[in-house]
Amino acid sequence: CSMLTEGAVTVIGDIRPAALQTVLDYANETQIPFIFLNNPADPKKLDDARMAPQIYIEPSLTRTIVDIIHNLYGWDRIYYIYDTVDAIQRIEQIHDYFHDYPYATTDIKPYELGPRDSCYDVLVKLYNLNRGEPLRIILDIDPIQAESAMAKIINEKDIYKVRFHFLLPFLSLRSISLESFKTGGVNITGFEIFKDGKIVQYKRDKLKTINVYDHIASDTLGLLVDSLRTLQKSQGSVNVFAEVNGWPHNQEKTCLPQLRGKWKYGSTLAQVLHRTKMDGKSGNINFHATGQRINYSVDVQEVTMYKGISILGTWHSRDGFNVYGEEQVLDKANRTIDNRTRIVTSIDEEPYLMAALEVTDGIPLIGRFRFIGYCSDLAEMVSRNVGYEYHIRFVKDGEYGRKQKDGTWNGVIGELIKHDADIAIAPLTITSDREKVLDFTKPFMSLGISLMIKKPVETDPHVFSFMRPLSQEIWLCTIFAFIGVSVVLFLVSRFSSEEWQVDSESKLENDFTIGNSLWFSLGAFMQQGCDVLPKSVSGRIVTSVWWFFTLIIISSYTANLAAFLTTQRMSGSIRSAEDLVKQTEIKYGPYRGGSTYMFFNQTTVSLYQRMWSFMTSQPDVFVKDNDEGIKRVRESNGQYVYLIESTLNEYYSSRLPCDTMKAGNNLDSKGYGIATPMGSDIRDKLTLSILQLREDGILDELKKKWWIEKSQCPLETTSKDPDASLTLSKVAGIFYILVAGLSLSVISVVLEFLYKTKVDSNKQNISFGSEARSKFRLSISGHSEDDTNEQRTPLRASTNMSSHEETTVYSKTQTVV
C-alpha cells in the first residue's frame, strides 16, 4: 500500500500463499502489475480467461518433481520433510499431479519440523523405523539446514548412508556446497535452472555455491526494463510515467476503497510483460496468460558416491523428462575406481562355487584359488576386465538373503547392505525387493522357475501292445460279431434261392458254406475281400452292415494305434504347473525364503496363487535348502515336485544317479546378476564387463563347461526325445503272430503230406518210405525221378473227378492245396 501511495508502476517481491489472493485483488483493482520472485500459486487453479496483472518469475517445480519420482525413479514411498506453511500447498499440488497418472501408487508421508526440531534427528528416526528399507526423502527446508542435516548423516559411522536418497526441490543444486557429498555415500537428486548459456562453463563451475534469488532478481529487473521500454515506445511522445508536472500518473493511490483508481497504462504494461520473451540467467523467459512461466527447461542432476555430480537429463515444461545420451552425461565408464582389494561374497552351491582340494600337484591352494565353479571363473574374468584385486569367500550364514521381521536382511544381501562385502557373485536372482536395497548389473545368466520331478521309469512295452488301441471288451465284441455275421450270412444264404446254383453234374450247390462264410467275413474285416460275393438281397444287407462296421473299427484302430506306438508311455503324470494344480496327491514346494518362495508369495497370477494356497496349507512342502529339496524328490518315488530355478534343475538332472528331470516349461523369466551396495563406484564397470563377456560368447562357453562338459549322465537323457521312432519291442507282437502263422502253416502241410502219403501207400500197396520219397521228389522238382508211365494215386483227388477217374490219374500229379 505504501508503494502504491508513492506512485509505483510495478510491485516486485515475495508473497506467502495465504496473502496471495488479497494481493491479486489489489492488482486487479489498480491494474498495477505485480511481479512475484517466488511462486506461491497453484498453476492448475489459475484462471486464464483474461490477461492477469501478475507475473511469477520463479518457475514451478511441482510437475518436475512428480515426473522424476514417477517416470525416472518409480518410487512407491516418499518422506516429505518441510518447515514452512508454504510447503503444505506444494504437497497438495504434488498429490494433484499424481492423479494425472492413473497407475501411480506413490505414498507421500509428510513430516513437519517444529521450531525446535532438528532435521537430522528426524532422518535418524526414519532410519531406525525403516530398517533395511531405502529412504527417499524430499527436503523442502532451508538449503543451509538441508546441507547441515545431510552432512551429519554422512559423518555418522553407525548409519548405512547409501540407503538415503534425497530430492532437493531447489531451483539450483548449487544452493548447497556439493564438495563434501562426492564421496559421502548418500544419493542426492536436484535441479539446475541457471545454466549461464554454456554447459561447458557450467560443468567447470558446478561445485560453486550460488544465491538463487540474486539470479531471479537479475532476470526480473531485465524483464521489467525491457517491458517498460517497449511500453514507452508504443505510446510515442507521450510520457506514460509523468503526465502532470512530472509526477507519476498514479501517484497518491492507496488501498482505501474510496481512493482506489486504475492506472491508465497498467493493463498495457501487463500485456507487454506477458508478451516479452528473453533469455535470462534462468533460461528462456516466457509467460502464459496466467502469469506462469512456460517453455522453460531444468537440468536434472544426481550426486552419488564416487561420481560427484552428473546430469541425468533435462525436464522441459512442454515435453517432460528427456534422458541424456551417454555422451552428454559425465563419463561413467571411464571414471576411476579406488584400487583397494574387494571382498567378493558368494554361496556354497554347485556348480557355481565349491571348495577345491587343498592341494593340487603338491602345491597348497591359497586365496581365491581355493574355490572352483562357474562363479569363481566369472569373478576372475570380471576382475581382469575391470582391473581390481579381490578375495572371495562363502557367505557366513549360508543364506541367499531374505528380509527379516525387523526390516534387516540376512545372507548375501545382508552382507552387502552392511558393507561386510563389496561384491556378490552368486546365483542371486534380480528381484524388485532386492533392487530397492542393492544395485545389480545386467544379468549374466537367464533362467526361470521350473519343476524338478523324479525321472519316471519307462514301462517295457507289452508284446501285444498293438492291441491296446482297443479295449479287451471291444476285441471280444468284435470276435463275437465276426462269428455272428458269418453264421447269419450262412443261414440267409441257405434260405435264399438266389444263392443256390446247379453245377456241371446237375447238382445243387451253395458257395456260402460255413467255411466260406467265415472266410468271407475275415477277408472283409482285413480289408482284403473274397472271390465269392452274395447274390441275394438279404445276403447283401448282411454284407453291407458288416463292411460299415469294419470300416469304423479299422479306422478307429488305425488312428489310435499311431498315437499308442509313437507316444512314450511313462509312469509320470506331471508335465506342467496346470497338472500340479489339478491334483492333490503329489506335493510340491520351493526353498523357503528364496526368490522362488517370494515369487509365489507375491504373485497375482491366479494359477500360481492356487499353487501358493496349496503350499501354505501344507508347510512341510518347504525345504531349508536345495540339497534337501533334491533329496526329497529322489526319495519320494514321484510324490514330491521341487520348484527350483531352471539352471540348477538342469545341472542336478545331469548328475548321478541321473534320476531327476525338468518337467515342462519355465514358470517365469528372470536373471542372475552381480550385486553391489547402492552407489558403488564399481557397479557400472561390472555391467560393461558382463555385456562384453556376453557379446564375446564367453558366458555361453562358461555355462557349457560346467553344465554339459562335466555332465555325469548320458547325453541322450537330457537331449532329444528317445521315442522319436518306433522300437521293435513295441511291435514285436505283430512279428510273433506272423511267425506263429507261418509255423502253423508249415506244421499243417507236413501233417497233410504225411497223411496223404500214408493213404496213398496203402492204396498202391507200396511201402510208406517209397511213397514218401516219390512225393518229396515230386514236390521239389515237379516230376518223379523215374521216367516210367506207371499211374499213381494223387495226393488229393479233384472233387469233379469220378471214382473211376480217381484210380486212373497219374499218382505223381500233386494237387495244389
Image (tube, grey):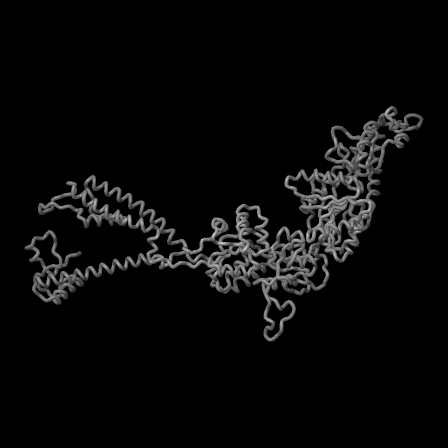
Residue 110, given in percent of the width and then of the height, sits at 73, 43
Residue located at (67% from left, 46% from top)? 76
- Residue sticking out furthest to the top: 258
Q: Quadrant of the N terminus?
A: top right
- 712 sits to left or right of 220: left
Residue 677, given in percent of the width and then of the height, sits at 68, 56
- 33 sits to left or right of 723: right
Q: Quadrant of the C terminus?
A: bottom left
- Residue sticking out furthest to the right: 245
- Whether residue 48 is situated above or below residue 736 in the rendered picture: above
- Residue sticking out furthest to the left: 804
Residue located at (26% from left, 47% from top)? 481
- 576 sits to left or right of 210: left
Q: Can residue 232 be seen in the rendering of this structure?
A: yes
> Total marks drawn?
0
Q: Which sits in the foreground, 560 or 293?
A: 560
Q: Give the image quarter of residue 225.
A: top right
Q: Which sits in the foreground, 673 or 632?
A: 632
Q: Can residue 192 be seen in the rendering of this structure?
A: no
- Whether residue 673 is situated above or below residue 321 in the rendered picture: below
Residue 375, given in percent of the width and then of the height, sits at 60, 62
Q: Give the image quarter of residue 43.
A: top right
Residue 260, given in percent of the width and then of the height, sits at 86, 25
